[in-house]
Amino acid sequence: MTETTYLQAITTTLSEAMRADQRVLVLGEDVAEGGPWGATAGLAEEFGAERVRNTPISEAAICGIAIGAAESGLRPVVEIMFVDFLTLALDQLVNQAAKAHFMSGGQLNVPLVLRTQGGAGQRGGAQHSQSLEAWLTHVPGLKVAMPSTAADAAGLLATAIADPNPVVFVENKTLYFRREEVTERPPALPFGCARLMRHGRDVTVVALSCLVSEAMAAADELAGEGIDAEVIDPRTLVPLDLDAIVESVRRTHRLVVAHEAVQHGGFGAEIVAQVQAAAFDELDAPIERVGAPFAPVPFSPPLEDAYLPGRAEVAAAVRATLAL
Amino acid sequence: MADGAAVQPDGDVGLDLLRTMWRIRVFEERVGELTRADEVHGLVHLSVGQEAVAAGVCGQLRRDDAVYSGHRAHGHAIAKGAPLERVMAELMGRADGLCRGLGGSMHLVDVEHGLYGATGVVGGNVPLALGSALAHRLLGSDQVAVVFFGDGAVQGGIFVESVNLATLWRLPVILVCENNGFAEFTPRSAHTNVERVSDVVAPYGVERATVDGNDVVAVRTAFARFLAEARGGGGPLLLECLTHRLRGHYEGDPQRYREALAADEWQELDPILRLQRRGAAEGWLDDDTSSRLEQEAHEQVEEAVRFARESPFPPASLTAELVYAS
């Protein structure tokens, strides 16, 4: 075992992929300087400016160039510095990357990874704090990964780079510097395979990204009240491991779905709809959702803190499913 | 370098250009009829009048050079070598279409012939060609990438982003603008104060030329020089072809926004008539050969229509099969 961070796991996985495959290249704003958090630190020194390409602030063109490069045989990994800026590249991602394989009758592949990061909690204001993953899950042709741990970030990124499809890899800025014990070389992880984070008998909590650790903290708190919560991290939203969630619900008969994104229209709603369709008779209580209110992320620190869902909201939702 | 009259095509080249332009012209006119007959479906944008650009450019490319196009792409596909019958079958939504019926008129792809794709979103194809050029360079190939777009694409932000990056990274890509003076229904003068697309890219230092895009020899001559540069690793380059879209923006467009050209005005512009006059004057084309090329195009197009009509519609299961590559 060795200690690492989510960010170091990303960097290590990128450099290993670039070492193993000459076709892998990294493009994005400031990537040769390591980017604002250092996710690409050291790559330019090892692999050179042709494969680690600093770009102007041109999200749409960066994304489009990566798609064209992928169609002609490279395996680009694009960094969009904040998921909020992905809005500028949506034509390329949604109309070009996601549909090229389909519209060409299977002739074209777009083995593209688009790394980005979302989430609030750093007083970034409403344009640097969003969680927009639900939009991406609505587009057939894209895969969406959203790891919550360093080991999963490493394992899923390796898989994403090897995938012949466009993958949006959504990191979370508040997770970057958490320290974590991992095996020396975390294994590549298949997409569509949820992680059971904690066994429990009374209620299933499905949590995404930074809400996973909040759900774990809530489960600790609830254990003190005699409530035994199971916590599941789907890890990839497309494809989604519905079976793992339904199997858990068949045992606990109660479900809470938690994410930091705005609750209204969030990916939690999709999980709820799929679970009730698959296991309506297993449910002993209405499914509870945890998410942000229907408002942009506020800047003022006390307001941002009040806005963000976390451990307390997850615990309250669990109690609600138990009518406590 | 816009003076194509300085270069004499030899007879073989001239006949090839004429053959390609006839294939496109006859195909497009037949597609117009089939659209009105509801045999060809959806939004259909024809390139009648603009054939010289497709023929003058694509005729010089290798099969493995990458071409990207836009919503008015039939001519580019044909000139790049896509089989007529598979293009027609695609427009009819049939299983033997280039894209197995999943693309349609605005999304033609034929990787075997280097057509990496048409896109229905104006301007969205430009960065894709840059990426293809980048891949060719990093993979050690001398393939070039070419992207066709209209003057309407130039007012989009993605165009400027792409030109900036192409010059910054010196990508071997040739940007071919078909400036037909209209962005959909609106004349260029109502969309921008910059008259020439070549002027838009001037500050970036892009090597550029503006030619009479209805003079196929002028297009071919200018493009030949650019192609040699890109083949040698140079670029980016921009070729602006001033041309005329004889039909509406789409089939069914009532064109209330402009006066139709008088027949004698069109005779002066028509790239096919112009090449025929030239061939006759230069002695490499006689009336018999001229009619034979037109007749052959009709026969090939009718054969393509027969092929497409006989092709079945794809099975409904195909939709789910092709969402992801495996």
Image (cartoon, rainbow, N blue to C red):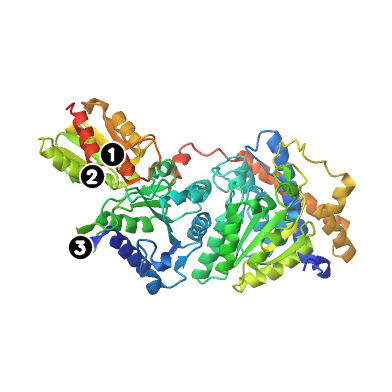
Return the mark for residue A214. 2
Q: Chain of mark 3?
A: A
Count of all numbered marks drawn on residues in the image? 3
Q: Is residue A119 above or below residue B7?
A: above
Q: Chain of mark 2?
A: A
Instruction: Name the spot of residue A98 as percent of width and height, x first.
Output: 47, 48
Quarter of the rendering occupied by the N terminus of chain B: bottom right
Report the amino acid beneath label 1. Ala
Instruction: Name the spot of residue B181 as percent of width and height, x first.
Output: 75, 50
Secondary structure, mark 1, is: strand
Of mark 1 and mark 2, the one earlier in the sequence is 2
Whether label 1 touches label 2, CB < 8 Å:
yes
Return the mark for residue B24. none
Question: Does residue A106 appear in the picture of this structure?
Answer: no
How far apart are labels 3 and 1 at the CA level? 28 Å
Residue at (21% x, 31% y) in the render: A254
Looking at the image, is mark 2 or mark 3 nearer the viewer? Answer: 2
Whether label 3 touches label 1, CB < 8 Å:
no
Report the amino acid beneath label 2. Glu
Secondary structure, mark 2, is: helix
User: Is residue B55 rendered to the left or right of residue A10?
Assistant: right
Residue at (58% x, 64% y) in the render: B166
Question: Mark 3 = which residue?
Answer: A3
How far apart are labels 2 and 3 at the CA level? 21 Å
Q: Are marks 3 and 1 on the same chain?
A: yes
Question: Mark 1 = which residue?
Answer: A258
Secondary structure, mark 3, is: strand
Looking at the image, is mark 1 or mark 2 nearer the viewer? Answer: 2
Q: Is residue A32 above or below residue A209?
A: below
Report the amino acid beneath label 3. Glu
Of mark 3 and mark 1, the one earlier in the sequence is 3
